[in-house]
Amino acid sequence: MQITNNTILITGGSSGIGLAMAEAFLKAGNEVLICGRRESKLNEAKEKFPQLHTKVCDVSEKTDREELFQWATTEFPGINLLVNNAGIQKEINFLTGAAGLLDEENEIETNLTGSIHLCALFIPQFLKQEKECAIVNVTSGLAFIPLKIVPVYCATKAALHTFSISLRSQLTKTNVRVFEIAPPIVKTELHREAKARKQSQRGISPDVVADATLKALSRDQYETIVGQAKVLKGAARIAPGFFHRLLNKVAAGKD
C-alpha cells in the first residue's frame, strides 16, 4: 500500500503513539486527522503540527463515534485510512471488587467496542472508494501473554487481535486492507496507575512504533509485532502458561 497521498484518521492522536504516527504520516505527504478526549492536548498537537485537523471525541461514547464519522467523511470525503489507536490501561483487581471497571474511563468501550464500531462505520465508506483503503488496529504484545495487574486491558487487546484476523479475512477480495500493529511497552500516557507507569519507563519510544507502522503499510505486512512483543508472541506458542507466570513474576519484582 502506498504511504503518501492518503487521508488518515488517527484516534487517540494527540499524544503518544498516535501523535508519533501523525507526525510520520505528515512527513510522508499525507493529510492527517486526529481525535482525542482533551481539547487542550489537541491544541498542543495542532500548535506543534499546524497541518493537523483535530476533533474532540471520546471514542468510548457511541454518539461521539458517530459524530466523528460524520465529520471525517463530510469534511474529508477522500478519507481512506483509519487508525484505531485510542486506548487506556487500568490496574483492576477482582479480589477487591474490580473497582474502576465501569468508570467513565472504560477500557472495554475505549479499547475494543469503539474500535469495532468505527470499523463498522468506515468500512462501507471505504468500499466505495476507488483507491486502496486500510484499517490499522493497534493492539499489544500483552494480547499474547497477559499481565495480571491489567487484566481487562490485556483482554481487550487479545480480542482486537482476533477481530483483526477475522476482519482481514472477510475483506480479502476488496480494496480494504487490515493491518495490526502490536507494540511492547511504550513510553506513553496510556498507563493510569503507578505500577504500570513505572514499567512504562522501560518502554520504547512511540517513534519506533510509528516507523514500524509506515514500513508495514509500504510492505503490505498485515501483522507487525514490534520489538520485544515478538518474544511474547513466540512464548504464547511454545508454553503460554509458563511464560505467563514468568512475565508476571518479573513484573512484580520490578514494582
Image (tube, rainbow, N blue to C red):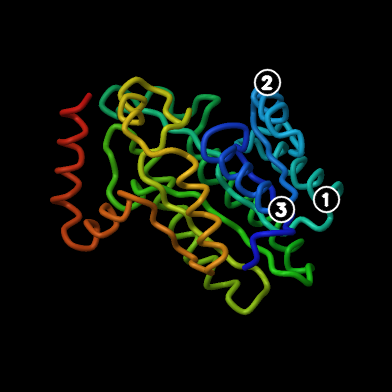
Mark 2 and mark 1: span between their CA atoms? Answer: 23 Å
Residue at numbered disc 1:
76
Compared to 40, does 70 lie above or below? below
Q: Which of 232 and 201 lies nearest the eye of the viewer? A: 201
Callout 2 crowding tier (Cα within 10 Å): few <14, some 14–19, many ≥20: few
Residue at numbered disc 2:
40
Q: Which of 174 and 32 lies nearest the eye of the viewer? A: 32
Assign a secondary structure to mark 2. helix
Q: Residue at x 67, y 24 (%)?
A: 44
Residue 116 x, y percent position in the rendering: 58, 52
Assign a secondary structure to mark 1. loop
Q: Which mark is residue 29?
A: 3
Q: Residue at x 64, y 49 (%)?
A: 25
Residue 95 appears in which quarter of the rendering?
Answer: top left
Compared to 185, does 241 lie above or below? below
Tell me the kind of residue under disc 1.
Answer: Phe
Q: Residue at x 42, y 32 (%)?
A: 187
Tell me the kind of residue under disc 2.
Answer: Ser
Quarter the C terminus occupies: top left
Note whether residue 198 is visible.
yes
